[in-house]
Image (tube, rainbow, N blue to C red):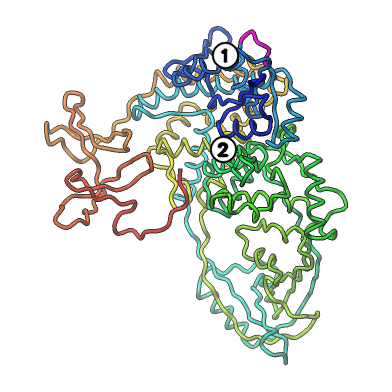
Amino acid sequence: MSKNLVIVESPTKAKTIGKILGPDFSVVSSMGHIIDLPKKELGVDIEQEFKPEYVVIPSRKKLLTQLRKEAKSKEKIYVATDPDREGEAIGWQIKERVFKGKDVLRVSFHEITPHAISEAFKSAREFDANMIEAQAGRRVLDRIVGYFLSPLLWKKLARGLSAGRVQSVALKLIVERERQILAFKAKEYWEISAKLAKRGVAGESAFCAKLEKIGDKKAEIGNKEEAERIISLLQGKDFKVSSVKQTEKKRYAPAPFITSTMQQEAFNKLKFNASKTMLVAQQLYEGINIGEDNPISLITYMRTDSPSVAPEAISEVREHIGRFFGDNFLPEKPNVFKAKKTAQQAHEAIRPSYISRSPESLKSFLDHDQSRLYELIYNRFLASQMKPAEFMVTSVDISADEYLFSSSGSRLLFEGFLSAYNNKTDDKEGEDEDKGKAANFLPQLAKDEALELNELSPSQHFTKPPPRFSDSSLVKALEEEGIGRPSTYAPIIYTLILRDYVRRIKGYLHPTELGFKVNDMLVEYFPRVMDTKFTAFMEEELDGVEEGRMKKLDVLKEFYAPFKENLDFAQANIKKEVVVSDQVCDKCGKPMIFKWGKRGKFLSCSDFPKCKNSKSITSGVKCPVENCGGELIERRSKRGFFYGCSNFPKCTFTSRTLPQEKEEKQPDTE
């Protein structure tokens, strides 16, 4: 019988760690939080220094009893929950509620390997009071905002809506971007390119140059007529090289992944949304069955904002690079990457647990998504400790009287880290460079050399609005603004979509009508809560609590005083928004009004609750089923939105898109 009890968060992780620790340790899962604030009450005593009133989660009561029973015969109890604020708090709550009065030690690690686990148990410690305070501070802040703001949304818009301290600021970013797009007016402009070649040399010397300047001014061509006029003036002109500049440039290796950059690259390269990325990364971290070794953790902890790497891992990857790529790919000293000032320096970057386990060797054990994400993490880490890629960039200016054309090309001199990882995602020129080809072929040219003009081509363009946020760009914006932390990026996006404030369409985030209304109400009545700088400041304050520089109570008081002032004003002044439709109730003749419910927007009789008549809002598109006569209605399920027939259940036609819309493959959704 085992002498020691170890508590972790998930069954998979328990199995992986149990295999490493052996028969003297019984490893069990808490299934996440056992204790939390009550669901239907505030659970915070504001008058008594914001004291949280934790309760056992109803669905966890049986588990709590089992843990107590498991602990009775054990000599030592260890808590090995995740190495962050949330993990520290989960462990502390279990200690206080389940094992109160017993000697319970905390162990934390960033990778599940025999060496890391052994070192963690040798360094078992007391719980970190500052981390626990910081987590409690965040939980209380989020509960106060959610508990008091949600009823105001119900009062003004509809029951069932919710607001969040961080999620609402993320919604604001998405709504503001959409308004920029709606207000944008495209402006026409034209470009002129010249196809040129060396005189007396065959066609393979041809290259393209773009008109950049006319006299001393930038070439700005507003319409077709102006472009054609310039082309006519250029006909017959002598084109000659006015300058040639060659520069060796280096592209440096990217840092190993942190949570935000992993989510961004997984979206850009694999088309994974943020939630899917974290789900797959968690599987790789907690353990995968690898042949006879069951299970094995393949990556380090996936919630981190630090690019730091353990010295042993640096030594291993450098040895691997030297053996498989050659010493000329190794920098003299290991590459070091600077972390943001708010990063948790005790954490590690996301990297493979074993550099010896190549993506190719694991393909038969991983599913398609696991294999692709592991390969991305593995190659990124490999590249992070390699020399820069080197290019020869050639820039040429060509003059034709007062008209100046420019062209540039690059040639790969040394692959460096690109032999392991291409970190270019949107730049086509960069992709060409990475294949070792010139992005734009340029022949050998000399100053004052005369060139032959083959063709002048005008091309029409229009300025583009700012792009909508994707999971990738929103995570990047949140990180740059200092909003949220590694563990919150994916849940923020998931919640916005779940509440139907935002919809993901072809991989990009579109605010809904409801999203606009929720945002506008919160911005009007709670400008401080919705201010990005203030939200970032609160995140820094919570970091200060974790570092012991700040007191939790001071942070909560600083937030609550102005919040209460805004809250009192809003409660006194917010009125229910009523939007009357052009339809009348077919039961009582009163006007029908628009409302929101769990399934989205619908029409309700204005005399509710006396008259409970309601009906769905149709799309106006006829059901394609022959002789049906119904119209398609947007409906909502756990899997997202779809269109169903208004004659349901008589007609069961459903479609993800309206029939006249072209079916397109959608990126992964929540």
Residue at 65% from the left image edge and 54% from the top image edge? 361
Q: Which residue lies furthest to the bottom in this view?
A: 200
Marker count (numbered): 2
Front residue of 183 and 471:
471
- C-alpha gap between disc 1 and disc 2: 31 Å
- Residue 166 seen in render: yes
Q: What's the residue type where badge 2 is placed?
A: Tyr
N-term mark: 1 or 2? 1
Q: Which residue occupies the foreground of this view, 356 or 599? A: 356
Whether 666 is among the magenta residues is no
Q: Mark 1 points at which residue?
A: 98
Mark 2 surroundings: few (<14), some (14-19) or many (≥20) residues within 10 A: many
Could you tell me what secondary structure mostly forms the magenta stretch?
loop
Q: Residue at x 57, y 83 (%)?
A: 232
Give coordinates of residue 560: x percent, y percent.
55, 17
Q: Residue at image x 30%, y 45%?
A: 634
Residue range corresponding to the magenta coloring: 100-104
Q: Residue 279 location in percent, x, y?
A: 54, 40
Q: In which quarter of the image is residue 480?
A: top right
In this view, 500 is above or below 396 = above
- As drawn, the label of residue 355 is none
List x then y, in percent, for residue 489: 56, 37
Q: From the viewer's perspective, is 590 left or right of 540? A: left
Q: What element carries label 2?
A: helix
Tell whether position 103 is magenta. yes
Q: How crowded is mark 1: few (under 14 residues within 10 Å), some or many (20 or more)?
A: some
- Is any part of residue 545 visible from this angle? no
At label 1, the amino acid type is Val
Which residue in the structure is indicated by mark 2?
489
Vertical order, 342 against 220 (above or below):
above
